[in-house]
Amino acid sequence: MLAWGVRRVLAHRLPVLAAVLAVTLAATVLTALAAFSTAAGDVALRRTLSASDHRDDTALTVTADVPDGGRSAARATVARQARSAFAGLPVTVRESERSVTYGLPGGDRDHPDLARLATLDTGRVRLVSGRLPSSVPSGSVPVAVPRIAADRLKVRAGDTLALTGRLDSRTLRVTVTGVYEARDTADPYWRLDPLGGRGAATVSFTTYGPLLAPAAAFTTGRVTTDSTAWSVTADTRGLTVADADDLRDRVVSARAALRKAPALGGAAEVTTGLPALLDQAATARSVAATSLLTAAVHLVVLALGVLLLVARLLRERRTAETALLRARGASTRRLSAVAGVEALCLALPAAAVAVLAARPLAGLFAADAAHAPLTAPVVLLALLTALAGAAVVLGTATPARDESASGRVRALPGPVRAGADVALAVLAAAAWLPLRSGDRLTPVAAFAPALTLLAGTVLLLRLLPWAARAAELLAARRRGAGAALAGRQFARRPAAATAPVLLLALAVATGLLATGQNASWRTSQYDQADQTAGAPLRLDDPRPSGPGQSGRVDGVRDLRAVAPVHRADTDLSGGARATVLAADTGALRSTVLSGPALADGALAPLAAARPSAEGPRVTLPKDAQALLIRARTGPRDRGVPAARVTVLVTDRHGTAYRLPAGELPADGRTHRLRAALDTTADAARFAPAGPLTVVEIGVEGSVPARAGTADLRIDALSTEGDGAGSRALALPAGLTWSAESTVTRGTLDDPARTLRPRAAGDGVALSYPTGSDDIGDATSTVRLRPGAVPRASAALPALATDAYLRATGAHAGDTVDVTVSGETLRVRIAATAPTFPTTGTDGALVVDLAAAEVWLAAHDRDPLAPTEWWAAPEAGRTVQAAAHLRAAVPGATVTVRDEVAARLLGDPLSGGVRGALWATAAAAVVLAALGLAAAGAGTVRVRRPEFAVLNALGAPRRLPLLLVAAENTAHLLTGLVTGTVIGVLLVHAVVPYTVRTATGARPVPTAVTDLPVTHVLLLLAAVATVPVVVTALLARHAARTPAGAGTEPA
């Protein structure tokens, strides 16, 4: 039996070889796809968990008010739940005990500066000077202070501070032993610190800390404990996809147990982003699996077509042989056993090659997959695929009993074929519609491209008989037997041309789909990088800062343009939220990465609204670092506290800053006030983005009990530069002053009074009514404005995204009110865009920052401070500019567009899917070549008797060559044209919906179809090369056919 089966396999070498190659190729690629999916899933999971932007999400943070005497039980509870949550993984638990807030000496009584003490892991800090505290002596508590706190508070090692408890007013004396800074503020450990390791933060109060204290200061009761926090981290480098779901469930259970643990007070705050991160990774794997399934379905369709074609050739050759065997008594059972032996002869080599080649091929998709072990399911898939392919070939190649007698295959009736075509079209539509309308990719969507491709190709090929008849009529009108005979054969046997044309069309369309998918995906990654970053470089620093911060960024080397931006969220109706960006739109046009969603000129209406003031104004020198004011107010009133003086300035970007200048007592004497112009988000000092313009000088004080008149006089203005001392500021000729006063009682403002300031030497003087206050909650504010005041428009022009318009029901030209950082702006929608960089899908409004500052100042509102700076580097200097920017602003976050794009493009799952698509396209070309070679060989074999007759009739010996070349050229051109038409239509119909993010969502901005013409031409050349070579060889072989030859031994 075995020998008989082997002889039958070797008896028809050409079709059997084509079958073996097709089965081997399909099994190898499918096995490689499975191996990649398994290996890349683990790699992608570990990379996701170890990514720098996910470090905080992987930690488990516990904050609790531990009962007195329960520290040991609390530690044991956290350690036990940590081991339970991360069972099997190395776990690290770090603790920090935090104090209540203490008031620092020397601050404002109503708004004091605050400080917290805490125990810290000394391995997470870097000592700048002095030493870290160790023991607790009987006197003051030794502490190390953050660097920013030491600079701002002007303290150093050896200084002693008296802190005042905010709860019990007890005095706690601390001695500074050293100055430290966080080694890495991105370390999840610093989530234990409310200040995030930055050393200071300002909301309503400025809080410094933590002041690093020894643990004994808390255990002895010297320091009042507020809460205890733990950070739990695990080493996930050994985590696999198989363990991810179990890990997620354990973390969720541990989080719930810690929240209710009695040892932690029964109300612990437990936060972790690990379950959500694991869900995100699972979604990414699902999206990748769907994309791989799409490639696999295409491959299966093509392989099935080739195998059916080869099976038909084998069946044609074996019809007489099988009939003879049946006539000699061979039973169906015996023939089936022989077919099984043949199947093993085909399947076993194919499975062996698939298993051996799977890992190297998977390594081409992603380098990490080349070293991953092959799992038992992957090996089983290789064997089953090879057996299935062999079964398709030999099961179809074995003629039925009635077919063996007639020697012909019965064709399906026309209605049946028409019904199958309609069913295929309906299936394609049913799979495509959910893909088009769904927000998430599902496994059903994997079949949509293949079904659409198959339906379109089959429907077009139904026109092939009519095209063949037209070709026959056209050829008959030409002189010469070659063209007429070729046209006759093409029209007489259109079914024989259907299979090779179908294979060519499928190969071309599959290649075009892979080309379009890859090119569109790559373009989408760059568009998403533009959307995420907003600019080539973006610096995020929401810390409160002064004018020096913009000057600090402006002065960074290798930057050609910088645009400050204020970002805020605003609430919409129905619980929706939107993003509001107030930006220097003049500079933003040179820095923003517009992408396909932002049309040229979309920001022009906003930039045109930038305010301009005519006439002289008070402009400070570019190197000014402080503004000095000599002022006095009276009459003398010891019952009225000193007034607070502020200065409102704008820099070259139009950004406004309200700066404190000090307190002005109501004693009638001249005082020297100073407003620092070089303040930044930390203790560093930088010249502002000058020149600065003085917009307003404000004097805010309490209203006396009895009404009267107060005098305010500013004698002179001067500036301080870098080591140059003070310089008098000469006011420009023709400078005019305007002023108004407002009395605020509680939350209500009295009507503003317009005042008439008068020039007084090098300054200005005015008198104003103070009003009266019997309750003691009223304040009086006087605003002096030098020079012409820019006029604020009734409504600011704004750019709105489509999502914002949908959420609010607004339209272009409408006027809406929007709340930005607690201040209400009235805006007019002057431009629209599908989306705007960095704003996501929630909707956004963009306004000009300078115009917004003028509008807020005109309505007595606080200015908007920049929270971001969008920058454009000099050509070819992105890497250097990013390094300079990170070094210039420590503690800030710098987003580099090129780094975001590289991260997106380097994702092992997405990159592997792209490689899988290319492998599928290459396999399609090879399979089509195998099918064409087999079909061509079968055609030559069938046509040998005809060629012998032509030779006997005296036809030229080159006539068979011309006939074979003409027929195969017709097949080739038909297949190429059909495949190109179907492929281009398929790319535009499917690709915009199959390009997704790692979470399966549609990208923002929406993916744009990209089908490079150069790639298309190269693909068509690659697909046509093998058929052309095969045609030449077959034609040459046909020309050499001897007269009377009618059989082929192989």
Image: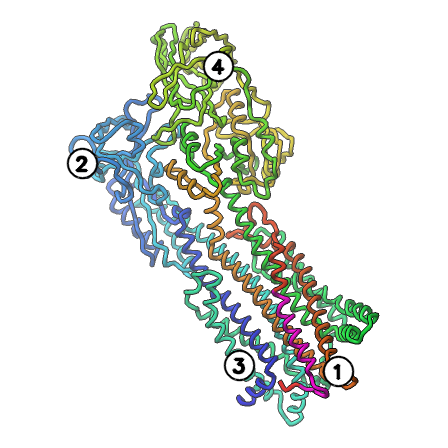
Question: Magenta residues?
Answer: 1022-1047
Real-space Cα separation, disc 4 to disc 1, in angstroms: 105 Å
Q: In which quarter of the image is residue 685?
A: top left
In the image shown, does 370 or 385 lie closer to the viewer? 370
| C-alpha gap between disc 1 and disc 3 | 37 Å
Are the two marked residues, 4 and 2, in contact with CB atoms closer than 8 angstroms? no
The one nearer the camera, 1037 or 350, is: 1037
Q: At 43% across and 40% down in the image, what residue appears?
A: 881
Disc 4 + disc 3, Cβ < 8 Å: no
Q: Residue at x 49, y 48 (%)?
A: 901
Q: Mark 4 points at which residue?
A: 786
Residue 352 sits inside the magenta stretch: no
Task: Tell me: residue 521, above or below residue 374.
Answer: above
Tag 2: amino acid: Val
Q: Label 3: how many residues lie within 10 Å, few (<14), some (14-19) or many (20+)?
A: some
Task: Report the side of 1031 relative to 81 (left or right).
Answer: right
**Image point (36%, 59%), residue name:** 238
In the image shown, does 15 or 202 lie closer to the viewer?
15
Which residue is at the front of the view, 576 or 10? 10
Percent position of residue 475, x then y: 80, 70
Mark 3 residue element: helix
Label at residue 344: 3
Q: Is residue 1046 magenta?
A: yes
Q: Name the residue under label 2.
A: 136
Q: Do the residues labelled 4 and 1 touch (CB within 8 Å)?
A: no
Give the label on residue 946, or none: 1
Neighbourhood count class around disc 4 (C-alpha, 10 Å): few under 14, some 14–19, many 20 upward: many
Residue placed farthest to the left in the image?
138
Front: mark 1 or 2: 1
Cα–Cα gap, marks 2 and 3: 82 Å
